[in-house]
Image (cartoon, rainbow, N blue to C red):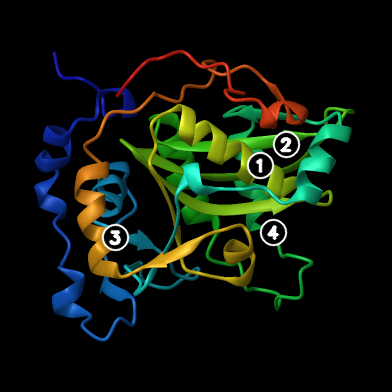
Amino acid sequence: MTRPFEAAYITPETLKSLGCYNFPNPANVDPDGVGVVVVGGDLAPETLISAYAQGLFPWFNEDEPIAWWCPEPRCVMVPTDYQPSKSLRRQAKRERWQLTLNQAFDEVIHACSLPRSDGLAEGEHTWIHDEMIDAYTELHAHGFAHSIEVWDDQQQLIGGLYGLKIGGIYFGESMFHRASNASKLAFWGLMRLCTQSNVALVDCQLPNEHLMSLGAKTLPRAEFLTQLDTLVGSRSVTWQPNSHQALAVAMLESPTPWQIQKNES
């Protein structure tokens, strides 16, 4: 019986079987580090997983051909190195907010797609358009894409983030907030979850001021790709919709805040 294409069943052998989605070597086709490696293809789950496993991600505007990127340098975060600010720690202690995993993926990705109120020009985030939303929602159904949600004491969604996980690496895509620092608390929750789940690296893709303020750093593209080869085939705890209980943000300071089932994939 053929196993379904789901995160719980993905192994290094599975990734190798997706050889029909071999992408060009970024060093050969993009020696100057512009970032764009190839244009075309589709956003089927197998294509996306193969691309991410090779260090590429899609980034393109609506009504444009699919562009696959592998930037130089790469922005990353080591979860065990993350240190929340003193002010964020104080806020977590006083708020009665909660974090959840995979409880509102549709709401999170749609919220991330909306224009921001952070000074960016309207249309800056049009890359999270309907085609992308449909593709990552399907990845979520297969167990690859995951969301972390932040809820206030009235059970209103006030922040969150989403991305996808393969083996020992999490590929971050986007985050949003409707209350001050809600996205930072989601990010802190992600760091703690990754640490508890044997996820050694978070790919933040492109550096920006906000990510660097959270403690992200840059790696040369070649170094990132070398680490990636090992990480995608490493074993980590599977993130399932009902495998993690809701977490009070005040508990983020505890040694192991997330209550998780040790199912590895």
On screen, residue 219 versus residue 255, left or right, reads left
Q: CA distance from mark 3 to mark 2?
A: 30 Å
Q: Nearer the viewer, mark 4 or mark 2?
A: 2
Quadrant housing residue 153: top right
Which residue is disc 2 drawn over?
150
Spatial distance from mark 3 to mark 4, Cα to Cα?
30 Å
Q: Are there few (<14), some (14-19), or many (20+) residues within 10 Å of tag 4?
A: some
Q: Which residue is denoted by mark 4 in the rendering?
A: 114
Task: Give, as a three-letter code, the residue at label 2.
Answer: Val
SS of the residue at dot 3?
helix
Where does label 3 land, which residue? 224
* Mark found first going from the N terminus, 3 or 1: 1
How packed is label 1: few (under 14 Cα within 10 Å), some, or many (20 or more)? many
Q: Residue at x 76, y 75 (%)?
A: 119
Of the numbered discs 2 and 1, the one sitting upstream in the chain is 2
Contact between labelled residues 1 and 2, with CB atoms less than 8 Å apart = yes
Kind of residue indicated by mark 4: Leu
Question: Which residue is disc 1 drawn over?
Answer: 186
Q: Secondary structure at mark 1?
A: helix
